[in-house]
């Protein structure tokens, strides 16, 4: 008997690649007049072993925990669509989210260094988009140019001065500053799409060159996203079945019920408080240490939150250890820095927010935030906007801890879109955004785990600081920007780390946005029915190389 491989890479290496497989002329991927003739017995992801093929399920159905956002690959920040994009698009380089090493994607080789500030990247032979159109260097240049102009990705790509076609298969990158070992990793951020696609098409059903392509998209809670194999895929991880479907279920109980009822084979963000019914249903839960954090975001232009002492006080007031034990069942670590202590570049910050209600009260008093109001209202009253997903379970304890130090909070639950809808535009001078504090989850490690990227995501010159926290107008912001630039161009790794350490200290002390703890990423799945699946540490589901099986009985 042939044992079905457990490693996603072993599966791909041992199974016959069915990139051709998808010789299925599938709607949404290949224009009708260009559909290839079906190949006999061709099934996506087929193995050379017919016994294994007989066991492969026709579809892979999973439950995702996040909703809404834009499917547009330009500056994509949606938790849901970043993960979907891993399956639909390719970059020049691909970030292996199990190891955080970069691998070849559309590029045929690593960047060729022409000089300190110039590199060339050659495309693999004859890449093709899922609609059958050729993928050219012009498409690559267009994707980079448009992402460089984007509010989210632009700051992360600011090291690129220009991107130009050299010839039919080579792209030239001219840099504004050296990037050293981070170059290849940062280039993986940009996903390539046809330059001919309109903005409307990119917002509705974008086309890529990855192993899957979008079939239908309804990203609202209760909706679903469906994918079909890309018949033209030429990479290492072809689709392994005929269809993939993601059920959008932001409610923990609803998502868990889908899993326990066996309507899905995998569910992300498995709630710790529902571990027993998940185990009783026969599913496995993997906990992978990552950077899936709940963070507090403060309106740094609105008194009293414009005072760093008030922001610090609200963090010192929180009994994070109890929160982790009660809500996370211990599957998290209190934040001792922006980064978790198992990430490269970690530095324990000079300010660590261990539970200290006395210190919290002292800081509030020092900032004048505990002065009683004349009308009898609480000295400090705030509104806490809470993202209506897994972090809502934290709100009750946070409010109780704040009340213990004299702060009254009213909680408002909002979905992801509503949460940021009115606070994502830079306010005019003299005006203040209409919020106090936000509680939300975030995970920039889905783009990479280098300190420069993670710090720039939340504290660079982008929507997070120009709007949202409104921290970009502070002197501390300018100081951080200078330190990050110094670190970016530092040739010596020890000097780079020394500068990053200063950044971590500054961010912790200022706390315009700061994590409460680093959560282990919990993914629930039926191991025997999802062969080759290996959960990742980052937020999102990654099914490249995973194969759905009809039964859990081993071959």
Image (cartoon, grey):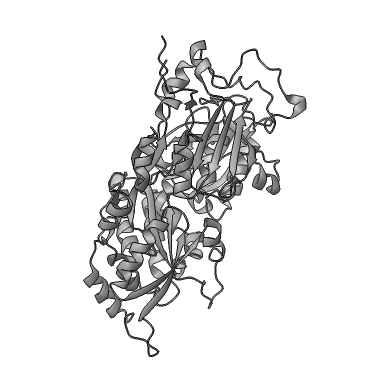
| Nearer-the-camera pick, 224 or 78 | 224
Answer yes or no: is residue 118 visible: no
Dividing the picture into quadrants, the one containing residue 403 is: bottom left
Q: Residue at x 53, y 15 (%)?
A: 54
Farthest-out residue, bottom: 374
Q: Position of residue 517 (x, y in %)?
A: 32, 54
Q: Position of residue 276 (x, y in %)?
A: 34, 41
| Nearer-the-camera pick, 529 or 6 | 529
| Nearer-the-camera pick, 233 or 55 | 55
Q: Position of residue 495 (x, y in %)?
A: 29, 50
Residue 111 drawn above or below residue 80: above
Q: Residue at x 54, y 39 (%)?
A: 246
Q: How many marks?
A: 0
Farthest-out residue, right: 33
Q: Is residue 208 left or right of residue 197?
A: left
Q: Residue at x 39, y 56 (%)?
A: 393
Indicate the quadrant containing the C terminus: top left, top right, bottom left or bottom right: top left
Residue 326 drawn above or below residue 550: below
Q: Position of residue 175 (x, y in %)?
A: 50, 46
Answer yes or no: is residue 217 visible: yes
Q: Is residue 91 left or right of residue 281?
A: right
Indicate the quadrant containing the N terminus: top left, top right, bottom left or bottom right: top left
Dividing the picture into quadrants, the one containing residue 178 is: top left
| Nearer-the-camera pick, 403 or 19 | 403
Residue 500 drawn above or below residue 398: above
């Amino acid at each position: 008997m042939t044992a079905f491989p457990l490693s996603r890479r072993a599966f791909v290496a041992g199974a016959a690649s069915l990139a051709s497989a998808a010789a299925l002329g599938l709607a949404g991927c290949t224009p009708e007049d260009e559909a290839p003739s079906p190949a006999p017995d061709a099934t996506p992801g087929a193995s050379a072993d017919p016994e294994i093929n007989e066991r492969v399920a026709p579809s892979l159905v999973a439950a995702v925990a996040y909703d809404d956002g834009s499917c547009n690959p330009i500056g994509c920040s949606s938790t849901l669509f970043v993960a979907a994009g891993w399956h639909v698009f390719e970059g020049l380089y691909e970030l292996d989210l199990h190891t955080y090493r970069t691998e070849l994607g559309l590029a045929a080789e690593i960047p060729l260094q022409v000089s300190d500030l110039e590199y060339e990247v050659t495309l693999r032979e004859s890449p093709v988009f899922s609609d059958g159109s050729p993928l050219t260097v012009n498409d690559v240049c267009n994707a980079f140019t448009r992402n460089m102009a984007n509010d989210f990705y632009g700051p992360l790509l600011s090291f690129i001065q220009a991107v130009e076609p050299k010839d039919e298969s080579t792209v030239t990158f001219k840099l504004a500053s050296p990037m050293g070992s981070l170059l290849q990793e940062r280039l993986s951020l940009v996903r390539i799409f046809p330059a001919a696609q309109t903005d409307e098409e990119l917002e509705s059903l974008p086309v890529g060159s990855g192993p899957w392509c979008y079939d239908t998209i309804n990203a609202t809670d209760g909706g679903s996203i469906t994918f079909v194999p890309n018949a033209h895929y030429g990479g290492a991880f072809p689709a392994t079945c005929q269809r993939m479907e993601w059920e959008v279920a932001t409610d923990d109980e609803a998502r868990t019920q889908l899993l326990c009822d066996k309507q899905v084979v995998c569910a992300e963000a498995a709630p710790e408080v529902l571990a027993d019914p998940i185990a009783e249903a026969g599913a496995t839960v993997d906990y992978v240490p990552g950077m899936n954090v709940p963070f507090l975001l403060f309106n740094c232009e609105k008194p009293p939150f414009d005072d760093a002492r008030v922001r610090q006080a609200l963090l010192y007031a929180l009994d994070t250890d109890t929160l982790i034990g009660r809500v996370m069942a211990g599957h998290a670590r209190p934040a001792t820095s922006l980064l978790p202590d198992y990430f490269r570049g970690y530095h324990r910050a000079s300010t660590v927010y261990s539970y200290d209600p006395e210190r919290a009260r002292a800081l509030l008093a020092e900032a004048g935030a505990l002065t009683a109001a004349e009308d009898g209202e609480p000295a400090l009253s705030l509104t806490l906007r809470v993202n209506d997903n897994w972090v809502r379970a934290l709100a009750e304890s946070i409010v109780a801890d704040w009340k213990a130090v004299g702060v009254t909070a009213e909680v408002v639950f909002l979905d992801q879109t509503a949460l940021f809808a009115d606070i994502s535009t830079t306010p005019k001078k003299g005006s203040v955004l209409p919020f106090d504090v936000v509680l939300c989850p975030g995970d920039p490690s889905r783009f990479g785990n280098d300190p420069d990227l993670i710090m720039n995501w939340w504290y660079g010159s982008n929507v997070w600081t120009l709007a949202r926290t409104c921290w970009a107008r502070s002197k501390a912001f300018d100081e951080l920007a200078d330190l990050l630039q110094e670190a970016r161009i530092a040739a010596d790794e020890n000097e780079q780390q020394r500068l990053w350490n200063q950044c971590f200290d500054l961010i912790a002390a200022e706390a315009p946005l700061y994590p409460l703890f680093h959560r282990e990423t919990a993914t629930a799945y039926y191991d025997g029915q999802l062969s080759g699946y290996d959960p990742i540490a980052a937020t999102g589901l990654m099914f490249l190389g995973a194969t759905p099986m009809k039964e859990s009985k081993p071959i």
